[in-house]
Image: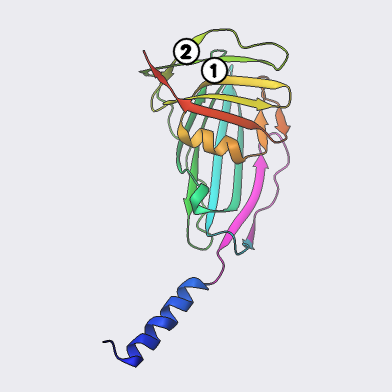
Amino acid sequence: MAAPGALFLLAIIFAIARTGSPIRCEVSHSIRTFSKRSTSLKTCGPEYDACGLLVMEVTRSGKTVRTVKKTCAKRESCVPGDIFMHLKNGLKETGKSICCTTDACNAVIPAVPVWNEAPNGFRCPSCSTTRSNPCPEETIHCKGVEDQCFLRATGNIIHAGCATKSFCASSARTMVTITDSLGVVLSSQSIICKPANKG
């Protein structure tokens, strides 16, 4: 049997672990086409146990829009990793999602990963249309590490194509969407993802 002093010490350690200091994260949101909002270090609420960072570059016809979002986050809902998505019309999104668990660990913005153009054997339906027009039955070849088919709705716009799991998770929790013309929509969106088909 453990000594009473040892049990008391274990109880203190357990209590400290459960009631540790709240995490502090940088919180900001900037879009290249708008004025930049300043970054601040925020003490997160007790429901948060991580810091999140999402950097995205959206490209079409040689034009790129870059967004950076820093937030308080929950480890259970974070899907860190490289983000890739593309549509048949040439619109593509490249980025990185980070989850970390120490104070201000989301301060440094990482480089956007290099796009891999090599087809990987997966295929997905792809379209870019409005809600009033059904997506045509067209498919595209997925590239690099894309292994998900997605359908994303923002306002009246529907996008479908190939993506990564990190893209699906990031789209589900962000309020910023870039339209086909690379305009910025500040509204919520819904997204459905499923494993891509081989062939």
Residue at point 54% right, 55% down?
A: 51
| Residue at left offset 42%, top offset 79% | 13
The amino acid sitting under disc 1 is Leu
Badge 2: how crowded within 10 Å, few (<14), some, or many (20+)? some
| Image quadrant in which the C terminus is located | top left
Quadrant containing the N terminus is: bottom left
Q: Which residues are magenta?
A: 21-41
Q: Can you give x and y, in whole percent of width and height, for residue 93 in the image?
A: 54, 28
Q: Amino acid at mark 2?
A: Ile
- Looking at the rendering, which quadrant does residue 197 occupy? top left
Q: Is residue 129 magenta?
A: no
Q: Which mark is residue 87?
A: 1
Q: How many marks?
A: 2
Front residue of 128/194: it is 194
Residue drawn at (52%, 63%), measured in percent from left and top?
Answer: 103
Q: Quadrant of residue 63?
A: top right
Disc 1 packing (10 Å; few <14; some 14–19; many ≥20): many
**Extreme-front residue of the structure:** 1
- What residue is drawn where x is 59% and y is 49%? 70
Spatial separation of the CA atoms under disc 2 and disc 1: 8 Å
Depth order, front residue of 86/195: 195
Q: Position of residue 46 (x, y in %)?
A: 60, 64
SS category of the residue bearing label 2? strand
115 left or right, relative to 104: left
Colouring style: rainbow
Expressed as whole percent of the image width and height from the top left, the position of residue 198 reads 36, 17
In the rendered image of this protein, does residue 140 appear above or below residue 194? above
Q: Are marks 2 and 1 in contact (CB under 8 Å)?
A: yes
Query: On residue 140, which mark appears?
Result: 2
Q: Give the image location of residue 77, x and y in percent.
A: 52, 47
Find the residue positioned furthest to the top.
Answer: 137
Looking at marks 2 and 1 on the same chain, the residue that comes earlier in the sequence is marked by 1
